[in-house]
Amino acid sequence: MNDLEGSTIKRRELLGGLAAGSAIAVASLDALPAAAAQAKRKRYVSVGVGSRNRMYQQAIWGPHKAHAELVAAVDTNPGRLALVGKLAGQNGAPAPKPYLATEFDKMVREQRPDVIIVTTPDTFHDDYLVRALEAGCDVLTEKPMTTTPEKAQRILDAVKRTGRHIRITHNYRYAPYRSQVKELLMSGEIGDVLSVDFHWLLNTSHGADYFRRWHSNKAMSGGLMIHKASHHFDLVNWWLSDMPVEVQAVGKRDFYTPAMAKRFGLVGGHERCHTCPETGDCTFFFSLKDDPALKAMYLDAEKYDGYFRDQCVWRPEISIEDTMNVIVKYQGGATLSYSLNAFNAWEGYTIAFNGTKGRLEHVVIEQAGISGLNGSSMGDEIQTRIIPMRGDPRDIPPATGAGGHGGGDTVMLAEIFDPNAPADPLLRRADERAGAASALIGMAANRCFQTGQPVKIADLVTGLTAPDYPRMPDHDGKVPMPRPLTKA
């Protein structure tokens, strides 16, 4: 979910230099003595202030201002640095001091931050994560943690060397209905899980948006297998409390192509929507100038770096896949069959866990739109069903919550910023081990796309251990005999 748009992709220096409950109540900053409030507040710095960072800005300036202050912002784009200062004022907060990306070390010396939040384009995560760790700072980053095995190894080595850890904001874990699935699996309702069938669908609003942005350059994002699917792989890793060991995958780009544009009756791919001569004929047209927030963040700021947020989805230089199928073998013996398609008729997912005592089916239909500034999935339709082996199905009323990503953002942000957050029996907090485990499945899949051969996770990195996961039903215990089949 890293949707920060940095400077142009052509400029390689781009930032290169239980079901979950409601949010924890936070006392109003105004109700605290000024000195006491200041003493309690942690000093945060944002590195990369595009759309994905907005969630953290709003949390710091809003419900968590009693415990946090944004003291500085780092970006390559002076326009976006100015915008974050303006937004701070609109929220009644002091403007964070702006620094260009080349001034990162200067920022650390001057501001002495407690926590550095990294929301740069994915390929640059490792640089800022390692530098933050070595500076003695706590560090938080958007998923994916990084994009290649070499970068993952660099991060794992830095964690070992410094003794510090990284928080990966895998907010999907926190959505109440997904936490509910975890609780059902932990309870042993379907026994121990032997296989998982998981299909994620992106529609032609949200799905197409990845092909307009820097994410369409695989060198920047790792492709949808890493940028998007790391969310999904992390969910399965956490739902199973297990580690992946081997991956097989195939991927292709079939829909967002110049050839498909011609099949739709268009001349072909162009540079961008803003200057496209076929705007009246292409229903994939995307207008930056008609969205005030996106206009301010991207269209008005592109004069500084030439980055276009509305690139043509049909242009030939796109290097990511839009159709992917993956099989993952887990250490505990379970297998995952997964697919991701970016041009579907609806948005959401279906997943089924096949266990020794039955099956758990979970379907979420999301009303997701353009990936922009709130990250919300509004109007979700959720169904969770337990089907005992040789028994009658039972629908489970879904747990729900308010806020972005099905209510998960609210719960996760409270856990991040509130020092009094309660202990979490579901262990939803993700560190660098979880970040690596999820991204490495995508990295292995990308390698499979190239070689056509299965890839072992252990061949990609060394020193990766399992995260702290909740205990699940084991694969060795006794299982009750299913009831007799009903005679015809």
Image (spheres, rainbow, N blue to C red):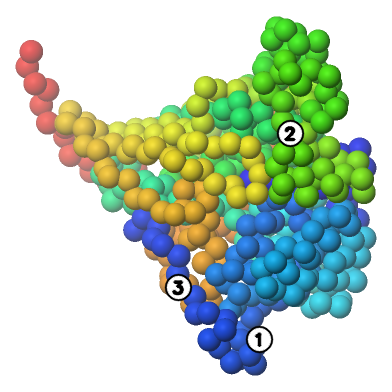
Which residue has dot 3 on it? 25
* Crowd class of label 2 (few under 14; some 14 to 19; many from 20; radius 10 Å): some
Alpha carbon distance from label 2 to label 3: 39 Å
Q: Nearer the viewer, residue 118 or 390?
A: 118
Task: Provide residue 223's location: percent of width, then percent of height.
Answer: 71, 33
* Res. 38 mark: 1
The answer to which of marks 1 and 3 sits earlier in the sequence is: 3
Q: Nearer the viewer, residue 97 or 458?
A: 97
Alpha carbon distance from label 1 to label 3: 19 Å
Q: Which amino acid is tagged 1?
A: Gln
Examine the rendering and report whether any part of residue 82 can be seen: yes
Query: Is 114 situated above or below 122?
Result: below
Which residue has dot 2 on it? 287
* In this picture, residue 252 sits left or right of residue 266: left
Task: Provide residue 82's location: percent of width, then percent of height.
Answer: 84, 61
| Residue at left offset 79%, top offset 28% | 273
Query: Is 156 situated above or below 96?
Result: above
Examine the rendering and report whether any part of residue 157 can be seen: no
Q: Which amino acid is tagged 3?
A: Ala
Query: Is 255 situated above or below 59?
Result: above
- Looking at the rendering, in which quadrant would you find the N terminus? top right
Task: Provide residue 267's location: percent of width, then percent of height.
Answer: 81, 10
